[in-house]
Each structure stands twice: as structure tokens, then as C-alpha cells.
Image (tube, rainbow, N blue to C red):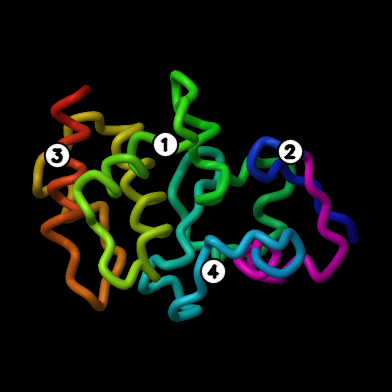
Amino acid sequence: MSIALTLNGRPFAFDGDPETPLLWVIREAAGLTGTKYGCGVAACGACTVHLDGAAVRSCAVPVAAAEGRAVTTIEGLAETATPSPADGLHPVQRAWVEIQVPQCGYCQPGMIMAAAALLRGTPSPTDAEIDATITNLCRCGTYPRVRRAIRALAAQA
């Protein structure tokens, strides 16, 4: 069975088991390895992508649920920015660089995707809203810098 979806703004078809986690379709079938595998049970958030603009944990979403929908990964995030960024970075990615959020960096693609979805729906979130929405796990403990980057973006809104 072929499952058609839009992946980072381009048509994509997956011919395989419709119950295959979206994460594995993104990584293995599409070859986009920016989305990370962390826990496999939607607890850590390393696999966060956007499904029709909403942040989802792709390890727990069967590819069939993405049929006819738009999936955006960290590789395609900059293309969703308005206006289109000259440097190829989404504003959240740029803030992450400027504030030096990552330490090891493994969880950061998922963190960035969660933050971008939060800011799209809530341009000036409170610390409580940040804490309630950004539930991704970071073993390095970069949470204060994540919050600082989100606040910096909110101040620009």
C-alpha cells in the first residue's frame, strides 16, 4: 500500500507497512537523519516533527496517520519561516546558535521543532507555557538556555 504525504514541502510516497512509525519512514525511507530516535515511546521528544504544523513525536505516529498531510522535519523547518531566511536558518535555529543552546546536541532537533510549534501558536509564551509545552528531555540540562532562546524570540514578536 502506498502512502502519499508531503515531506518538507515535496510529495513523498511510502510503499510499506502503514503501521511503520513515521520516524523510521523519515530516517530510513526518506534518508533525513536530523530527526533522532531517543526512546521509541514518545517520552523524550528527540523525534519531534511537525504534522500539519503541530509538534508530534514521530516514533509513536504510524505513517498511515500522515496520509495526505504535511510533515516538516528539522531539515525543512527553515522553508516554513516567513519571511524566507537568507541564511537558511529558521529564526528558532538562529536563536539556538546565537544563544549557544546545544551542548551535545542530540536532542536539539526535537527541541527546536517543539519550540517552533510553540512560538507559532503562542508568539510570547510565559515561562509556565514554555515549561508545559517543551517537555522534551535533554540529558545535558540545556533547559535554561532553551528558555532563554524562546524568550529572545518572543521579545522580537
Q: CA distance from mark 1 to mark 2?
A: 18 Å
Q: Judge whether residue 131 is colored magenta.
A: no
Labels 3 and 4: the sequence-earlier one: 4
The disc label shown at residue 60, or none: 4
Tag 4–tag 1 contact (CB < 8 Å): no
- Quadrant of residue 20 in the image? bottom right
Q: Percent position (x, y) of residue 116?
A: 36, 41
Nearest to viewer (mark 4 / mark 2): 2
Within-10-Å neighbours for mark 2: few <14, some 14–19, many 20+ = few
The residue wearing badge 1 is 90
Looking at the image, residue 56 sits to the left or right of residue 146; the answer is right
Q: Amino acid at mark 2?
A: Arg
The residue wearing badge 2 is 10
The disc label shown at residue 151, or none: 3
Describe the element under mark 4 as helix, strand or loop. helix
Describe the element under mark 3 as helix, strand or loop. helix
Labels 1 and 2: the sequence-earlier one: 2
Describe the element under mark 1 as helix, strand or loop. loop
Q: Percent position (x, y) of residue 138?
A: 27, 71
Q: CA distance from mark 4 to mark 2?
A: 23 Å
